[in-house]
Every structure is written in C-alpha cells, then in structure tokens.
Image (spheres, rainbow, N blue to C red):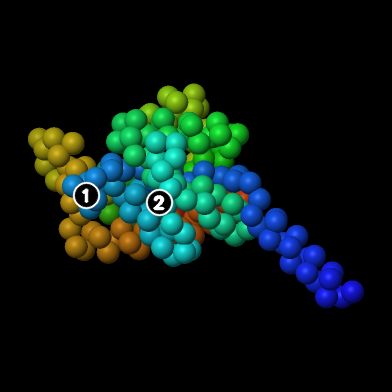
Amino acid sequence: MADIFDLFRQISGKREETGPVSWLVVGLGNPGDEYRSTRHNAGFMTIDELARDIGARIDRAKFHALTGEAVIGGVRVLLMKPMTMMNASGIAVSEAAKFYKLSPDHILVFSDDITLAPGRLRVRARGSAGGHNGLKSIIEHLGSEDFPRIRLGVGEKPHPEMDLADWVLSNFTDPEKLQLHSAALCAEEGLKLILSGDFDRAVQLCNSHR
C-alpha cells in the first residue's frame, strides 16, 4: 500500500508542476541575424540566457512569436520572443495574454534601456514606456502600464548628434557583452524572486547590481 500511495504522491506532484501557464516572460528584440548582437536585442539575449540556464527551449512558433514553456521555482511560465519586430511587440504579448487569461501584473518584460550603463539593471512594477517603442506597443495592446519589467542597461549614445536608431542597432563591444552577461544572470535571479512573490527583494537585488 505504501508503494501505491508513494506513486500517487509522485503523480500528483507532477500534475501540480505541469499546471497551467500563470506567467508570461517576454524578452524584447528584433528577429534576424543582423540584429542578434545589437543593443536593442538585450531582452532577447537575456531570455536566451535564461532558457539555457534552466534547460528550456524557445522554439515553438505561436502568437507571432517564438515561445517555450518552462517551470521556474514551481511556477509554469511561457517564455516569449516576439517575431513582429520591436515596434509591434504588443501584438504577440496581447495574444498570449488573452489565450492564457493573464492579467498585466503576470507579464514580465526584459528590455533594453539607454539611460542605464551596460551592466546596470532597473526593476519596475509598472510605468510608462519611457521612449521605448517595444514597451509602448505592449502598453497600447494591453491597454495597461501595470506590468513588471526588468530593464537592462545598454549605455547612452556616445555623441549627442548620433541618431538614436543607429546607436541601439549597433553591436555591443566585447567588454560590454561581459557586462550584459553579468546583468542577465542577476536579472534571472530577480525574475525568480518576482515569481515567488518577493518583488521588493527583486528590486533591491537588481537595482543595486553593478
């Protein structure tokens, strides 16, 4: 009998672990090899790093995006990389949110931030797009600013006269790639804290990262 109950507990545990998707985790960027290492793709790079670290794959075409399910800290999430180009990211996010019946506060977004130095992070529970067209699209399609985001520093443009698009579509230098990698690892830990319900600790951890 003990063996039967042990088996029942194992099956029950697996069912609990493979429950419905309760969070959407989005990395923002532009699809295509020409954008792979650009500053604007810091969100893609971060979610790819996360997927590698937890043994997940983001390779299923759905919701105008590449997606993959994963369990992080007992929470089932959908990892997403919108394939719509940055300025239309909200199309993919809103479709997934509707399908899984997710409220904005259960949608976390990784995005680049030109106001932060490479390697720096900023966590916010909600807020405006701050000039970021990917976030602007998500806000427009969700009809809400109330979704958490982890913004990754990519640095300010080096010269005031430089076109902003040219800057965010430029590649990271090798030292900056190392700084982004360090920030991405910290962002992963911040994500885990947010999924566990400890948003304040996530803010403290990520916003103090250097």
Residue at image location 39% in from the left, 36% down from the top? 64
Report how far apart the C-alphas of labels 2 and 1 lie in the structure.
16 Å
The image position of residue 198, as x and y in percent, is 60, 52
Tag in front: 2 or 1: 2
- In this rendering, the answer to whether 147 lies above or below 144 is below
What residue is rendered at 41% in x and 43% in y? 61
Check disc 1 and report the residue beneath it: 33
Q: Is residue 3 visible?
A: yes
**Type of the residue with mark 2:** Asp
Residue hosting label 2: 59
Q: Left of 137 or right of it: where is 170?
A: left
Taking the image as shown, residue 149 lies to the left or right of residue 100, namely left
Q: Residue furthest right?
A: 1
Cβ–Cβ under 8 Å for marks 2 and 1: no
Residue 38 in sight: no
Disc 2 secondary structure class: loop
Question: Where does the image place residue 177, in percent across and percent down from the top left?
Answer: 25, 60
| Label drawn at residue 192 | none
Q: Nearer the viewer, residue 129 or 75?
A: 75
